[in-house]
């Protein structure tokens, strides 16, 4: 039985440097990987899932992170006790790895063909064989025109193509184990679906064992044979994928699965008011790159004739993949970007035509919440200063501003003491709440949420969505909700607009658009959503399942 | 900020640097008390070697002037020139770099061309010419050093502003309708201060060197004793009276070294992620 196992991790404990907020990154971890199976390790950020992968590959960061105890047996041989030389012959050739960020995993100043050849060279493949191997590898990962592509530099490839190159490198020596650390997290959904299919296909044809690390239960449902759920460095549940997904035994697993957003079946009740808060007509934005003496002027149409209305208490979703122009649209609305044409009508004023100074009094009416909870707060200002800056800029006296700030802090689920602390003392979810409080402090009529929950773990995501939904009802706020995640859009939005290459390809009431997409692009987006076939709690009422 | 100061003092290099610099400042401030006589006056026998007469521990020069007194008064010139000229350069550099980086476009192009213009002129010769034209005085030396040393500050600040301007907290401030002045001064500037502070500390050292070089060439303030002047005046007699140029030279080396130690310590404390290797 032992010889059957490809890899077995036994009682692995990895200590963190003493300054960390917990003693061990990973504690008492044990699991096996059999040939020809895909084991998914799922968990939220900080659960120790990536640390586990790094330990197997011998890539633990130097600074104070040490393996305290345990064994990692690869075909009966302990990787942790192995000499560096012996490990090198295994790493890359018998255990391959794919990283999350394909751009940083490739050397930017080296042609991709040469990078793959380097892997072959490192493991002693004769020089004459290398170019042929490179081409067949690029072919195997489904890249078009391998010969031409091998001579390109990474920056000329799309994200999905780069990830395919990284996979080709990992597969170059036909490893027995492939470790994939969030390989699709940085990719668009349609690309993600293709990459998942590719990994699954190669795994089947070569009979590799795959350890697939992810935070997305949808991906797990699509790809996993077995699942290990991690929390605080421990495995809380491990078992066949179907069992864990459909009948989770552990309370934490249950809460995670409950937090995974699902498509809503019934439409939200429409907003009663007929008069829109903003009326956007024919919005255009073209980026022009300046030409030099020898380079022609290049134009890129980020937004092409976008029109929509948003009423009080209504949320309009703007969905699309990266580069579709959805963020540009949001930023045009708050005039962080000046549109080239079209109108943004607010209370009979066209905001698109106003100059910067004329716009100042209207700034408070349209507010924005950003994606990155770490970059969106000034690290040198206390939370109180950040929230009060808006009201003070609009001439509200300090006492009123302070009262308003205290009220909002409590409203978004923090306490008044938070005002005197700095952003780095808060978690991502808490920072996002602060960002929401800052936007609400100037009493806007319209809130633009630009991927406001995309950077958060699912359980935190659910809580922040709940907060957004509550304040929408409480303040009768109009909201433009920008996201790449159709499931989240369907949870929160009354209506959606599907953006593709700067154009609205489809719009309408959310549930009917997602159930009967008329446009082929919308359909491909919906088909690519991970975990679509996975219907958990089959007897339960999935229509009303929400974030509670 | 207090915790930063504490961490700075825990760095042995920076702690020694700070201690010695404080000593130099104290000596400079107390120079008239320690040496009530004018440093230019003939106090004793000419060419008195050091460590022979307890009244003149570092000896005297060819005119019988006390070397120790010269060093104490020279410290005032070096410190004043180093600190004031750096302050001028930082104010100028931060202002121009900040405007260029924040507004971008035409303002950026215009200001950066001006900066490049200044950068193409060899700095030391430019400073020398300015001192010669403005007639040598401590004010003209400060002005000259300030004018030649602001461009690197401007470029640094411009790059910081340009990258911070796109950050989401600045975008949020714009969306909240805060004024440009407020965004530049309250949101962006505090976030650029650490690298500027580090750069400034190292600029003080190079300003002291530049002043010494200007004085060495005889273009120093004729009414103020300075280290560079002392070395310059004694170069003709270096074989007979080595101590006349050795002690001022030693002091310059030590002060510049100490300032660099403090600057690097500051860098480690303020930019922990860029800390020098081998510290992790």
Image (spheres, grey):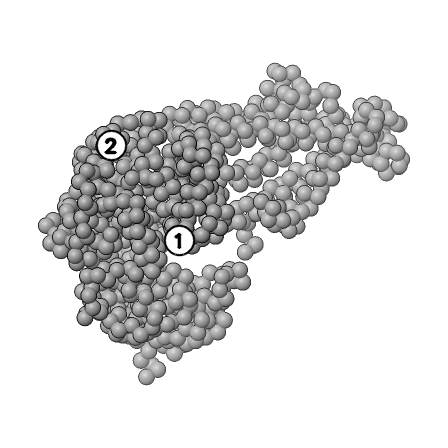
Q: Nearer the viewer, residue A532 or A494?
A: A494
Seen in the image, is A266 located left or right of residue B33? left
Q: What residue is pinned by disc 1?
A: A413
Residue found 20% across the figure and 36% down from its top: A279
Helix, strand or loop under label 2: loop
Kindly identify which chain the residue marked by label 2 belongs to. A
Do we see residue A74 in this rendering? no
Q: Nearer the viewer, residue B237 or A361?
A: A361
Tag shown at residue A181: none
Seen in the image, is A339 located left or right of residue B134? left
Seen in the image, is B206 located left or right of residue A73? right
| Image x and y of residue B31, in percent | 78, 31
3D distance between C-alphas at marks 1 and 2:
32 Å
Do we see residue A43 in this rendering? yes
Is tag 1's residue or tag 2's residue first in the polypeptide sequence?
2
**The C terminus of chain A lies in which quarter of the figure?**
bottom left
User: How dense is the environment of label 2, judged by Cα within 10 Å: few (below 14), some, or many (20 and up)?
Assistant: few
Q: What residue is pinned by disc 2?
A: A347
Among the 4 quarters of the image, the one containing residue A125: bottom left
Instruction: Please tell me whether residue A171 is drawn above or below residue A488 in the rendered image.
Output: below
User: How dense is the environment of label 1, judged by Cα within 10 Å: few (below 14), some, or many (20 and up)?
Assistant: some
Instruction: Please tell me whether residue A135 is drawn above or below residue A434 in the rendered image.
Output: below
Kindly identify which chain the residue marked by label 1 belongs to. A
Among the 4 quarters of the image, the one containing residue B20: top right
Residue found 26% across the figure and 73% down from its top: A247
Residue found 29% across the figure and 59% down from its top: A547
């Amino acid at each position: 039985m032992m010889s059957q196992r490809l890899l077995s991790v036994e009682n692995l404990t990895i200590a963190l440097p003493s300054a960390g907020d917990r003693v061990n990154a990973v504690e008492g971890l044990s699991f096996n990987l059999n040939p020809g199976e895909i084991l998914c390790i799922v968990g939220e950020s900080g659960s120790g899932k990536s640390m586990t992968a790094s330990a197997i590959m011998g890539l633990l960061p130097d600074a104070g992170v040490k393996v305290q105890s345990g064994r990692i047996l690869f075909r009966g041989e302990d990787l942790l006790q192995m000499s560096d030389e012996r490990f090198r012959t295994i790493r890359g050739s018998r255990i391959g790895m794919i990283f999350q960020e394909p751009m940083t995993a490739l050397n930017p100043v080296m042609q991709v063909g040469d990078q793959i050849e380097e892997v072959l060279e490192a493991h002693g493949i004769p020089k004459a064989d290398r170019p042929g191997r490179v081409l067949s590898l690029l072919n195997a990962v489904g890249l078009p025109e391998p010969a031409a592509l091998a001579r390109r530099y990474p920056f000329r490839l799309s994200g999905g193509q780069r990830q395919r190159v990284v996979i080709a490198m990992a597969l170059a020596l036909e490893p027995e184990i492939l470790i994939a650390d969030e390989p699709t997290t940085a990719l668009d959904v349609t690309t993600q679906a293709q990459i998942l299919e590719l990994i699954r296909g190669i795994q089947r044809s070569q009979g590799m064992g795959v350890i697939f690390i992810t935070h997305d239960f949808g991906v797990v449902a699509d790809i996993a044979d077995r699942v290990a759920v991690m929390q605080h460095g421990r495995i809380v549940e491990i078992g066949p994928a179907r069992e864990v997904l459909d009948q989770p035994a552990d309370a934490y697993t249950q809460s995670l699965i409950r937090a995974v957003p699902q498509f809503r079946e019934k439409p939200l009740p429409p907003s009663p008011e007929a008069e829109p808060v903003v009326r956007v007509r024919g919005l255009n934005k073209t980026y022009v790159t300046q030409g030099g003496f020898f380079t022609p002027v290049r134009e890129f149409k980020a937004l092409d004739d976008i029109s929509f209305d948003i009423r009080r208490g209504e949320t309009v979703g703007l969905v699309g993949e990266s580069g579709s122009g959805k963020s540009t649209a949001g930023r045009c609305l708050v005039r962080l970007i000046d549109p080239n044409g079209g109108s943004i009508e607010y209370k009979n004023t066209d905001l698109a035509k106003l100059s910067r100074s004329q716009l100042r009094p209207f700034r408070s009416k349209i507010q924005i919440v950003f994606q990155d909870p770490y970059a969106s707060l000034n690290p040198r200002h206390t939370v109180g200063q950040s929230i009060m800056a808006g009201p003070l800029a609009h001439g509200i006296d300090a006492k009123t501003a302070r009262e308003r700030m205290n009220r909002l802090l409590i409203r978004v689920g923090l306490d008044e003491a938070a005002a005197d602390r700095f952003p780095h003392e808060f978690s991502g979810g808490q920072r996002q709440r602060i960002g929401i409080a800052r936007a609400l402090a100037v009493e806007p009529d319209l809130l633009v949420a630009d991927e406001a929950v995309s950077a958060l773990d699912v359980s935190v995501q659910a809580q922040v969505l709940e907060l957004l939904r509550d304040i929408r009802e409480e303040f009768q706020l109009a909201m433009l909700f920008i996201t790449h995640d159709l499931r989240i859009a369907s949870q929160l939005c009354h209506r959606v607009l599907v953006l593709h290459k700067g154009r609205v390809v489809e719009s309408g009431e959310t549930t009917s658009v997602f159930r009967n997409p008329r446009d082929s692009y919308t359909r491909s987006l919906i088909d690519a959503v991970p975990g679509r076939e996975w219907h958990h709690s089959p007897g339960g009422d999935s229509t009303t399942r929400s974030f509670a | 900020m207090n915790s930063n100061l504490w961490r700075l003092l825990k760095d042995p290099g920076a702690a020694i640097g700070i201690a010695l610099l404080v000593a130099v400042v104290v000596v400079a401030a107390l120079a008239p008390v320690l040496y009530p006589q004018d440093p230019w006056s003939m106090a004793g026998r000419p060419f008195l070697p050091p460590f022979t007469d307890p009244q003149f521990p570092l000896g005297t020069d060819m005119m019988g002037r006390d070397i120790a007194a010269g060093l104490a008064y020279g410290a005032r010139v070096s410190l004043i020139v180093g600190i004031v000229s750096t302050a001028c350069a930082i104010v100028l550099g931060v202002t121009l770099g900040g405007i260029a980086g924040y507004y971008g476009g035409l303002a950026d192009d215009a200001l950066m061309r001006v900066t490049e213009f200044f950068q193409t002129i060899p700095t030391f010769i430019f400073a020398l010419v300015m001192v010669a034209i403005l007639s040598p005085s401590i004010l003209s030396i400060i002005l000259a050093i300030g004018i030649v040393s602001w461009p690197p500050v401007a470029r640094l600040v411009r790059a910081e502003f340009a990258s911070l301007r796109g950050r989401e907290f600045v975008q949020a401030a714009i969306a909240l309708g805060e004024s440009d002045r407020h965004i530049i001064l309250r949101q962006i500037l505090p976030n650029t201060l650490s690298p500027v502070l580090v750069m400034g500390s190292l600029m003080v050292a190079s300003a002291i060197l530049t002043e010494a070089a200007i004085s060495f060439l005889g273009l120093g303030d004729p009414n103020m004793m300075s280290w560079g002047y002392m070395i310059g005046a004694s170069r003709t007699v270096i074989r007979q009276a080595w101590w006349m140029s050795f002690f001022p030279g030693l002091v310059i080396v030590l002060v510049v070294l100490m300032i660099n130690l403090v600057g690097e310590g500051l860098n480690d404390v303020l930019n922990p992620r860029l800390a020098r290797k081998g510290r992790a």
